[in-house]
Amino acid sequence: MTATTRLARLAATAVAFCAAVPAAAQPAPDYDVIIRGGTLVDGSGSPRRAADVAIKGDRIALVGTIPATATATRTVNAAGRIVAPGFIDTHSHAAPGIETPALADAKPILLQGITTVMINPDGGGAGDLAPQIARIRSLVPGVNVLPMIGHNGVRQAVMGLANRKPTPNEQARMEALVKQAMDSGVYGMSSGPFYVPGKYSSTDEMIGLARVVARYPHGFHTSHIRDESSYDLGVIGAIKELIAISRATKVTGVVTHMKMLGPSVWGKSAEAIALINAARAEGLSIWADQYPYAASGSGLQPALVPGWAQEGGGAALAKRLKNPEQRSAIRKEMVANLQRRAGANAIMIRTYKTDPSLEGKRLDEIARARQMDPLDVAIDMMEKGGAGIISFNMSEKDLEALMKQPWTMTSTDGGLVKFGEGNEHPRAYGAFPRKLRRYVLDKPVISLEQAIHSSAGLPAQVFAIPDRGVLKAGAYADVIVFDPRTVADTATYTAPHSYSKGIDDVFVNGKAAVAGGKIVPERAGCILLRQR
């Protein structure tokens, strides 16, 4: 046997020997959380599938099949349940509550499956957001909080409640406040030209501010448009204004809590949809969000009083109402505004500090009891501090038509108040579960995949919120687990303080926020600012 042959045989033996020896055992993976056996709807719009989810720290470590030998500090049995990304509320009035220690846990928000809220909508908030951001950060909120810089807040900081155009110096100061916010990491701007003082702004004024936002990557402008009914521009004209702002600045534009408000514009959703589709075909980034209720929430003053009479705020309005000629002029315009809202029976008093016994009653009901005209009741209430209202003014057909659009996201437009305080709109407790229950599971207007995409993955995409809104390895571990058999809103217009059910496990940044349907005391939310 030659040396070469012997070496070949030795090599073959060595290979055989190595192949026969089992590989060294690898340790079983260890995670913080394993969610096993659920049906995954990952937020991207992709079809549901069976998959496990593992969480390590504040991130998702694995989506797929997790070995039975893997260990975790906490294991969630998701058999028969849906595993989805935490929802992103694109229009939330929860900021005052979240800034209050007693409400910072955000219980009614978490029990809807919401893990991120976008605050200061409708142009709200202060001109300088630094104090608000510092307060929320110091409290460690129960949910993630994404602040927007509001046009109304900026305008009021510079011009008060004046009904006039800004001077060049004032315009520059407003733009400087927007720049200050964007430099600090704020993602984008909200506006509310339906409300004072934004009501007194021109399109050019808002274009100037939007141009500042457009200098930053993925900047956006989300707007409670100037008219959702037929007050001024009309809802179609108001959507055109938002599109014009985006066309002039190339900034992403969002019609927030989109609706056709009042019988005079019912059915115009078809025209609005065509208008937005045409703008998108043009190459503009135009979107909308929506809450799944046919009733809106506002105040008597912005809903019924003409804009010119609101200049200077509530005290100034009260003074005008004492002047017989001005009172007559205001009342005359209120007649048409009440008709736009579908009449006195369509107005429910939501909050009225002067006489809480009137909360939950309709305006016509109060008028009959007082033997007064409903408009005179409304004026009397405004003279005594004003009232929050729920206005039953939308068509289900319009609501469903808008919901079906691939560019429509989900929002609450809800506040965060002490449980049982005031006659809150039920959307504060139930918007997201209501969409699942009423429009997916009971009456399939849209698919489960679209509902979750519109509530998570789509907002993260539109507002460029990195690593959120989808379930994938490396994303932040904002995860919810819910039972499709039981998920539902329980809050109603007459009994609004009632928590949603069925979303029994919620994780925020990898930490349990809801476990077995119960709020976990430890809070894990954070302020979300754009990476600079």
Image (spheres, rainbow, N blue to C red):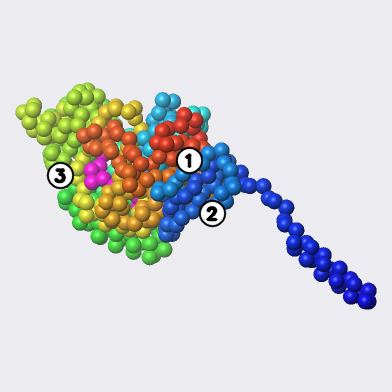
Q: Residue 235 magenta-drawn?
A: no
- Side of 136 where 165 appears, left or right: left
Residue picked out by circle 1: 507
Residue picked out by circle 3: 342
Ranked by sequence position, the earlier of labels 1 and 2 is 2
Nearest the eye: 375 or 180: 375
Quarter location, residue 100: top left
Ranked by sequence position, the earlier of labels 3 and 1 is 3
Residue type at mark 2 is Thr
Q: Nearer the viewer, mark 3 or mark 2?
A: 2
Q: Quadrant of the N terminus?
A: bottom right
Residue type at mark 3 is Ala
Q: Which residues are magenta?
A: 288-297
Residue type at mark 1 is Phe
Q: Quadrant of the C terminus?
A: top right
Nearest the eye: 22 or 118: 22
Measure the alpha-carbon separation of dots 1 and 2: 20 Å
Q: Residue at x 49, y 37 (%)?
A: 512
Q: Residue at x 22, y 51 (%)?
A: 396
Q: Position of residue 224 (x, y in %)?
A: 32, 45
Does dot 1 land on a helix, a strand or a loop? Answer: strand
Does dot 2 land on a helix, a strand or a loop? Answer: loop
Q: Residue at x 17, y 45 (%)?
A: 340
Q: Magenta: predominant secondary structure element?
A: strand
Residue picked out by circle 2: 65
Measure the alpha-carbon separation of dots 3 and 1: 42 Å
- Side of 108 where 267 appears, left or right: left
